[in-house]
Amino acid sequence: MKTWKAKWFGKLTTGELYEILRSRSEIFVVEQQCVYQDMDGMDQEALHVFCEEDGRVTACLRAFRKDAETVQMGRVLTLKHRTGLGSELLKRGVREIRKQMNPGRIYIEAQTYATGFYEREGFWVSSDVFLEDGIPHVKMILDCI
């Protein structure tokens, strides 16, 4: 059974935090073969939106204030690809960000292969392609006003 949660860092249980970090490592480090410093000091300021299934975090994202008007969303992942879980995560994430953070815009640095995924939810590309940890990315924005 899927259980969706949206929690600020200080409200996460140690088990939830462990599972979030485990899933991020599984996708970004192991699956995408990208060695990088995941724990960057931003989790403590972030709203974490995630799905639990049978004790595992199968989808998650985080969001934190970039500036007074902008919330940055990132670390978006699903363990189950091409099942609709990612779309559900993005919809729930945007809804929770709007509800709990009331931004003027949501900003993300998206891997280029995923731009269509974000465009379906109203994000638009706002930059040229750039490399982040050796992976092509673009900046994308969702206007919330």
Image (tube, grey):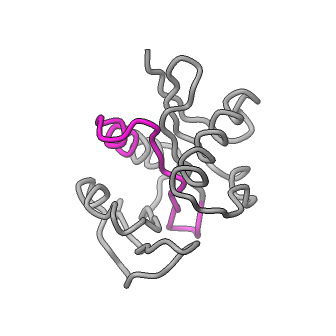
Query: Is residue 84 within the magenta segment?
Result: yes
Q: Is residue 18 above or below residue 45?
A: above
Query: Is residue 45 within the magenta segment?
Result: no
Q: Quadrant of residue 144?
A: bottom left
Whether residue 145 is visible here, answered yes or no, is no
Q: Nearer the viewer, residue 53 or 30?
A: 30
Q: Residue at x 53, y 29 (%)?
A: 5
Q: Quadrant of residue 34?
A: bottom right
Q: x, y percentage for residue 129?
A: 39, 81
Q: Residue at x 47, y 46 (%)?
A: 77
In the image, farthest residue toward the bottom: 128
The count of marks equals 0
- Is residue 9 shown left or right of residue 32? right
Q: Residue at x 40, y 74 (%)?
A: 138
Q: x, y percentage for residue 17?
A: 70, 36
Q: x, y percentage for residue 24?
A: 59, 46
The region drawn magenta spans 65-91
Q: Nearer the viewer, residue 11 or 112?
A: 112
Q: x, y percentage for residue 85?
A: 35, 36
Q: Is residue 115 above or below residue 8?
A: below
Q: Is residue 90 above or below residue 111?
A: above
- Is residue 116 shown left or right of residue 16? left
Q: Residue at x 70, y 32 (%)?
A: 12
Whether residue 30 is visible here, answered yes or no, is yes
Q: Nearer the viewer, residue 36 or 10?
A: 36
Q: Quadrant of the N terminus?
A: top left
- Is residue 73 shown left or right of residue 127? right
Q: Quadrant of the C terminus?
A: bottom left
